[in-house]
Each structure stands twice: as C-alpha cells, then as structure tokens.
Image (spheres, rainbow, N blue to C red):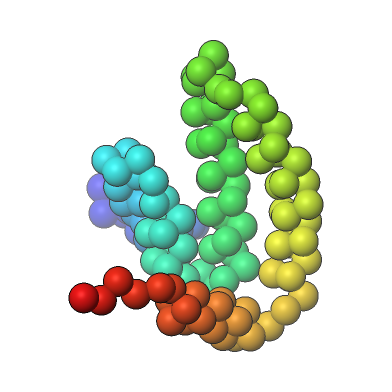
Amino acid sequence: MIQSIRGFLAVFGLSWLEACGIITLAATLQTITGFGFALISIPLLLTVYDAHVSVALNMIIGFFSQSLLTYHCRRDVLRPVVKNIFLGNLIGIPLGIYIFLNFNFRSLKLLASSIVLFLVLSWPSKAT
C-alpha cells in the first residue's frame, strides 16, 4: 500500500495532491454557501502553483462546473439577462486575458489593491 502511494506521488507529485485537496475544499464551501469557489481556491492554489497556472486551472474548472450547472437549470434561465452577460464577456474575457498575460503580476496586485482601497475610502459613511 505504501509503495503504491509513493509511486503515485512520484508520478504526479505532491503539488497535484495538494491542488486536489484545495479544489475539493473550495467546491465543498461553494456547495454550502452557493458562491466563493474562486475566493477560496485562488489564494490557496497560489501556495502550490504560480499565478498563471492557478488562474488557468480555476478558469477551466469553473467553466466545466458552470456548464454543467447551466445545463441542469436551462429551463429557469432568463435568456435576455444571459444574452447581456454573454455579450459583456465577449469584450471582458479577451481584455482580461491580455492584461493577465502581458502585465507584471506584482503591478496587477498593486493596481487591484489601489482600486479596492480607493473604493473603500470613497464609500459614503453612515456614522451617527
């Protein structure tokens, strides 16, 4: 039994096993809450793989899981809303892929952090 585990790890590596555990955890939490797969999986996958692999892996898994979900819920879908989202994705996804592949990861983190900080600080306060 131990030999087969060692053989498995020799072929696939420990990082593959860690990634499976991370994906399982994120999928379980998404099943419980209804959202948050990427919120859990991306930061944890960054501990195992670099940013490009983590995001690509997340996109592939998300595509297949959402395709399956869409197939099961196809009768309840509001078609005009899906059409608008799809048209927005036609513009947003290629632009996002271009930015992701051609910009420095550190610069992207700084830009995203700055935008979030600006939005938080500019949010109107209801202090009494």
Left or right of 26 on screen, residue 54: right
**Which residue sits furthest top?**
75
**Which residue sits furthest left?**
128
Can see residue 96? yes
Can see residue 109? no
* Image coordinates for residue 99, horizontal then vertical, percent: 74, 70
Left or right of 66 on screen, residue 30: left
71 or 60, which is in the foreground? 71
47 or 8, which is in the foreground? 47
5 or 31, which is in the foreground? 31
* Image coordinates for residue 64, horizontal then vertical, percent: 57, 37
* Image coordinates for residue 28, horizontal then vertical, percent: 30, 44
Name which residue lies at 46% across and 55% down: 38
Name which residue lies at 47% across and 78% down: 122
Q: Quadrant of residue 56?
A: bottom right
76 or 30, which is in the foreground? 76
Left or right of 78 on screen, residue 3: left
Name which residue lies at 67% across and 27% down: 80
Left or right of 56 on screen, residue 14: left
Q: Quadrant of residue 13?
A: bottom left
* Image coordinates for residue 70, horizontal then vertical, percent: 55, 26
In this view, 48 is above or below 76: below
All told, the count of numbered labels is 0
Quadrant location, the C terminus: bottom left
